[in-house]
Image (cartoon, rainbow, N blue to C red):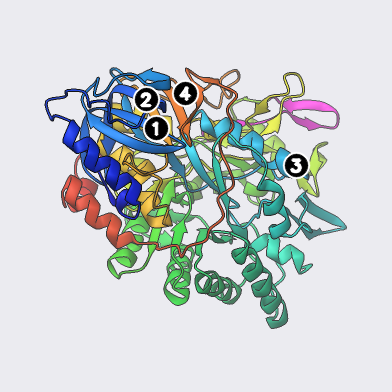
Amino acid sequence: MFITSRCTSSMMSFLLIAFVASVCYDVSGASPDETDIGPYDLIIRNGRVIDPETGIDEIATVAIKDGTIHRIVAGSDAFAEDARTVINADGKVVAPGFINTHTHEAAALATEENIKPASNLYVFDGITFWLGGNCGLSPTGIKVDVGDGNFMQVGDPEKPMPAFLDELENIPLYNHYATLSGNITLRSRMGLKHMQHEDDAQIERMKAILAEELAAGSFGLSIGAMYDMGATTKALVELAKVSREHGGMAAIHTRYPTFNLKHLLFGVDFVFPKRAIHEAVDICRTSGAPLIVSHITDMSQAGSIGWTMETLEDAVKEGLPLAGDVIGHDFLINNFFILTFKGKIPIPILMKLGNYKIDQFYAAADYVINGEVAVKQFDQFTMEKALFLRKHIRQMDAHTQGIRDMPMFCQIMPPEDTMLALRYPWVFIGNDGGGPSIDPETGEPAPISPRGLTAFSRLFGHWSREKGALSLHEAVFKSSTAPAIWLGLEKKGRIQEGCDADIVIFNPDTIIDRAGWVDGTIHQKPDGISHVIVSGEVVVENNQLTGATPGRLVRRTWRIPGNTAEILSLYEQRYGSGLEEKVSGDGV
């Protein structure tokens, strides 16, 4: 039996191969005769091949040549070994490479230093394709006047995106990379100050720049509405329209987090501010641009996730090309200086508003006041520490471009929120990996947060195997096939003949994330992923880089479909239609 798909339909050579092989192959598992087209570059034997689009789940042999899956034959030893490399995947799943829909670059000045460290880290988590430039921040960087003579600047915001992509074209990576164009970067190109609204002339200039970037291969517009609230809805809609006119998409970090104040109102649901989600839906509806609502659970606080998911689901039922993504960790990173609005909000009020407890917060760096370390990195907050820091917040020695360096690890993500969001077929996975730095002692990429090493291994190990939030099949679907369909990556996210050989091999019984937020764990790589294959080359083998760098820049040349309806149809076909039961059943 041969596994075929639309990936081969336009390739006459593969059809000929399939015809010849089908004559020679016995469904009992006998090997093909000498008409086989080997030698192959890579053969994967005895693995459990899972492809959500075709519904295949069986022990099979996968043969790869020239970066493409050439044959998939049922059986553990379907044809004689004739390959440069042979992998025995006994007891392991052979799945499509993971697609990361939300992440960030290092935003360094040099193009290679900007992208390659992130590519290095992300591949250990099985990521074979990642979409950067999120949250309104293009990979080239920003320069924004934040007042009092201070500028927030990262990267080289004056470098045109087309020039950046041209430089990146010939830089070898560990996995495939594509980018969005950030609205805050566009604002900085206009010289707009932080919180300053755009005028009509500036909007028109931003639209022209965005059109050039889309023509150069950008996947679309990213919106960081929370990071510069001066951006008007009018400007965001106009930019999203340009993205759609040129075949692109949009992604949004919503303007505010939402809160449910029922813990203050005797159990009566009261979600505010609803505008944040309504604005995202309206941008999608008005512009027609397929839109991803980024890291949904991070932005739905204090029990508001139910309302958020219902509101987005209503938009999907309306037929809008809308999707979302989640990170799946219990922690997020924030800044004490920003979280307290530069020390203006009293700590008890902040705790009440979010229904937080003070011991859910940890220092992500040493806090130095007047030359003395007031709080050490990884220290757990107490109310006494928090009140002291708020009182002396403007005496902090360390600051960057007018913003006090007071990063915090915030353990405020209830597991039931993530479990609920994961049960919607149109919710993908994004690691929100902050741009890694380079360890001065080792010269190796060093994560500034563990997210870049945990999103997908945590999905399969923690959320699927341990918590039962979704099945193994659904996890494969959500991490590969579903985002590939939505983004229009027709040869990725699939284990099918004629498709790209971007593959992850993992043990479903042992895969797990290990990087955490406490001292000594932030760099730990996942367990259970034995091989990561990109364009037919083994990049990671048993948690070690092989030295292969087959990853490349992906320029968008097609119209992103944003076909949420197709995802729902395939999900129903493969896993049943009981979404209502899934999101209202036990454990949620």
Q: Is residue 214 visible?
A: yes
Identity of the amino acid at label 4? Pro
361 left or right, relative to 324 = right
Q: Position of residue 73 (x, y in %)?
A: 24, 31
Disc 4 to disc 3: CB gap under 8 Å: no
Read off the residue under disc 1.
64
Q: Give the CA separation, mark 2 to mark 3.
A: 59 Å
Read off the residue under disc 3.
393
Disc 2 to disc 1: CB gap under 8 Å: yes
Pair 3/1: label in front: 1
Q: Position of residue 72 (x, y in %)?
A: 28, 34
157 left or right, relative to 523 = right
Question: Height in image: 142 above or below 374?
Answer: below
Q: Give the CA separation, mark 3 to mark 1.
A: 58 Å
Read off the residue under disc 2.
43
Residue at image coords 41%, 57%: 488
Identity of the amino acid at label 1? Ile
Disc 4 to disc 2: CB gap under 8 Å: no
Give yes or no for residue 299 being in the magenta stretch: no
Identity of the amino acid at label 2? Ile
Pair 2/3: label in front: 2
Residue at image coords 26%, 23%: 79
Read off the residue under disc 4.
526
Q: Which residues are magenta?
A: 358-376
Judged from the image, the secondary structure of the residue bearing numbered disc 4 is loop
Identity of the amino acid at label 3? Ile
Judged from the image, the secondary structure of the residue bearing numbered disc 1 is strand
Question: Height in image: 211 above or below 555?
Answer: below
Q: Give the CA separation, mark 4 to mark 3.
A: 37 Å
427 left or right, relative to 201 = left
Query: How busy is the neighbourhood of tag 2: few (under 14 within 10 Å), some, or many (20 plus)?
Result: many
Q: Position of residue 2 (x, y in %)?
A: 21, 38
